[in-house]
Image (cartoon, grey):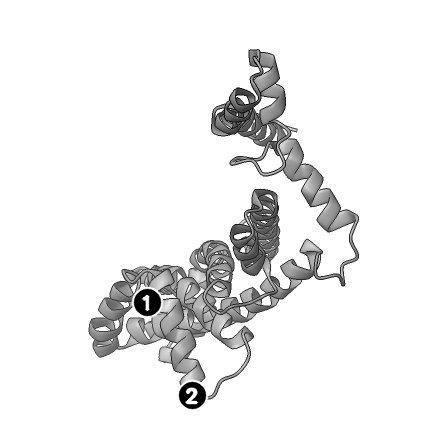
Amino acid sequence: MNRVLPILVVLAAILALWYVAVVPMNAGWTIAQAERAGHDLTFADVVADTMNQDRPRLPAPHQVAAELKKTVLDTKVTSKRSLVFHGWITLQSTLWGFALGTTVGIGMAVSIVYSRTANMSLMPWAIISQTIPIVAIAPMIIVVLATLGVEGRTVPKAIISAYLCFFPVLVSMVKGLRSPGAMQIDLMKTYSANAGQTFWKLRLPASMPYLFTSLKVGIAAALVGTIVGELPTGAIQGLGARILIGDQFGNPLMIWSALIAAACLAGALVTIVTVLQSLALQRMGYAR
């Protein structure tokens, strides 16, 4: 209960601020319509109307909840109107991108730790790569892959997802692999351990807390990359496509329901990684 209460308090505060923001955001249309019709509105009338507009600038929480119920619970998961269906499309590319980004990040980290040349060459480029906005590089990736004959939308989205995912894994793994102290390294040398044995027996186990911390950041970044990647690919399936279609047709409820669904999906993925972290670190003796 002590862990749940702070979360509930923050959630209640967010909902309260959201409801407060709905009135000024949507009041302009309500007042304009009343002036055209020659009606006088009280503040209560304005508040009531702003909470139930068909195409509000900012939907009220209960409107978004109703849209989520309709598209998640009241619609078959195989329907293209179902957010479960679109969430599954986005999840597939996210997991592929996460796997690719994690593999690349760990591989680069090992190279940087064990090679001075790689340290001086790879790390600066990895840092520079993160200064390029993903919305700028995503179309470039799509064009290059199309030129190479790569068809389909899963691969481009996975690569864009991996692009955002690999960097936190890289930085944390470099820190983790370098975390053993000089005395620990010297102890391995007294046992006549070679570089491989030192890696598997000392450096890699020591890096696990750093790795899992980066994976929680990486899985969320991978989801963001997938959603961003769905926008320029012209995708008609996925949460990003749902947001884009909602924007094109002026349907804020569709946009906000997709955003909330993406947030819930991100929370579920981070929770899964957290559970795996707890199990792994307990087994390795880091936590009880």
Q: 288 or 229: nearer the eye?
A: 229
Which residue is farthest bottom? 149
Residue 273, how many percent across, how many down?
57, 56
The circle drawn on residue 185 is 1
Q: Residue at image x 59%, y 63%?
A: 90
Residue 25, how many percent across, how many down?
48, 29
Kind of residue at badge 1 = Ile
Mark pair 2, 1: CA separation? 46 Å
Kind of residue at badge 2 = Leu
Query: Is residue 107 at all visible to an observer of this figure?
Result: no
Within 10 Å of disc 1 (Cα), the crowding (few <14, some 14-19, many 20+) is: some
In this picture, residue 112 sits left or right of residue 67: left
Q: Secondary structure at mark 2?
A: loop
The circle drawn on residue 148 is 2
Residue 259, how many percent across, how many down?
56, 48
Residue 121, how many percent across, how many down?
22, 75
